[in-house]
Amino acid sequence: MNKIGFIDGTIPKPLPSDNAMYNAWYRNNNILISWILNSGSKDISASIIYDESALEIWQDLKTHFQRRNGPHIFNLRRALMKLKQDIQYVSSYYTNLKSLWEELSQYRPSCTCNKCTCGGVKSLQEHYNMEYAMSFLMGLKESYSQVRGNILLMDPLPSMSSVFNLVTQEENQRDEGTQSTQSDSTSNPSMACAFSGLKNNPSKLDSGQYKQYPPCKNRPFFSHCNIHGHTIEKCYKIHGYPPGYNKPRNNTPAAANQL
């Protein structure tokens, strides 16, 4: 027998004159009372033990222990507004957003009527889906601005699962492109030599001084200066510096410039 009616009041207490219905209601009501009393602590049970029906006990408990929804809803909405992707992967960011959104949706009004013919329920669901997708797109990094703009131009706006798939595809393409670039630079000896020099002096890249040189193994090596790039015929240290040339004060490899 369905017992929820005794809790929400949909199964009212029958009149004692209806002997069969009254006895059935009385037995089921006592069963529910015993369940409630045994599931709570002794202190709580002592405060409700004299209630005559399961409905009275439930209303009493609801009055004393129901948590106010206002502060909790406020905290959920504030956390939702502050949530950003930052350095997270799209999947991790979406998981955090989904947990907040689904918990917040428990406090939104909804219609469970299956006989709605005006389309109001469908419009309400579409509106919630739009807010869900907007919250997700707003928290993405600015590097996803292009795919975000393309999604916002769609009419109607796709479902949240479709939006997540589109952004995830963009992230996967970027990862593949990054791996391909790293693989090409590693397999190219010229780039490997250039980046090895750039690693020791990264400021050259920002100042525009970086030049791509031929592979180290193909460039001449002069043992007197211990550097690549010139030979004994073109060494300033051996043949002398040209007039007006400011000789470096230290003995760095840059002092052995080519003639």
Image (spheres, rainbow, N blue to C red):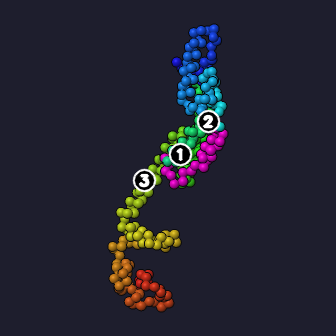
Is tag 2's residue or tag 1's residue first in the polypeptide sequence?
A: 1
Instruction: Classify residue 198 as left or right of residue 106.
Output: left
Q: Nearer the viewer, residue 41 or 197?
A: 41
The residue pinned by badge 3 equals 176
In this view, the mark in front (1 or 3): 1
Expressed as whole percent of the image width and height from the top left, the position of residue 123 reads: 61, 33
Amino acid type, residue under disc 2 in the picture: Tyr
Q: Taking 221 as reference, is 29 left or right?
A: right
Query: In the rendered view, would you say 199 is above or below 39?
Result: below
User: From mark 2 to mark 1, how far is it between C-alphas?
Assistant: 18 Å
Instruction: Identify the residue at image location x=58%, y=16%.
Output: 26
Percent x, y of residue 173: 45, 51
Query: Residue 157 magenta-drawn?
Result: no
Residue drawn at x 46%, y 85% as measured from the top left: 250
Vertical placement of residue 175 versus 18, above or below: below
Q: CA distance from mark 2 to mark 3?
A: 41 Å
Which of 155 and 80 lies nearest the eye of the viewer? 80
Query: Horizontally, is 18 left or right of 225 in the view?
Result: right
**What number is the disc on residue 96?**
1
> Image quarter for residue 211?
bottom left
How many angstroms separate mark 1 from mark 3 (CA)? Answer: 25 Å
Helix, strand or loop at label 1? It is helix
- The segment highlighted magenta reads 69-91
Q: Secondary structure at mark 3?
A: helix
- The mark nearer the N terminus, 1 or 3, is 1
Q: Label 2 crowding class (10 Å Cα cut-off): few <14, some 14-19, many 20+?
A: few
Q: Which mark is residue 139?
A: none
Going from N to C along the chain, the mark reached first, 2 or 3, is: 2
Q: Position of residue 203 (x, y in %)?
A: 50, 71
Q: Residue at x 39, y 61 (%)?
A: 184
Q: Which mark is residue 107?
A: 2
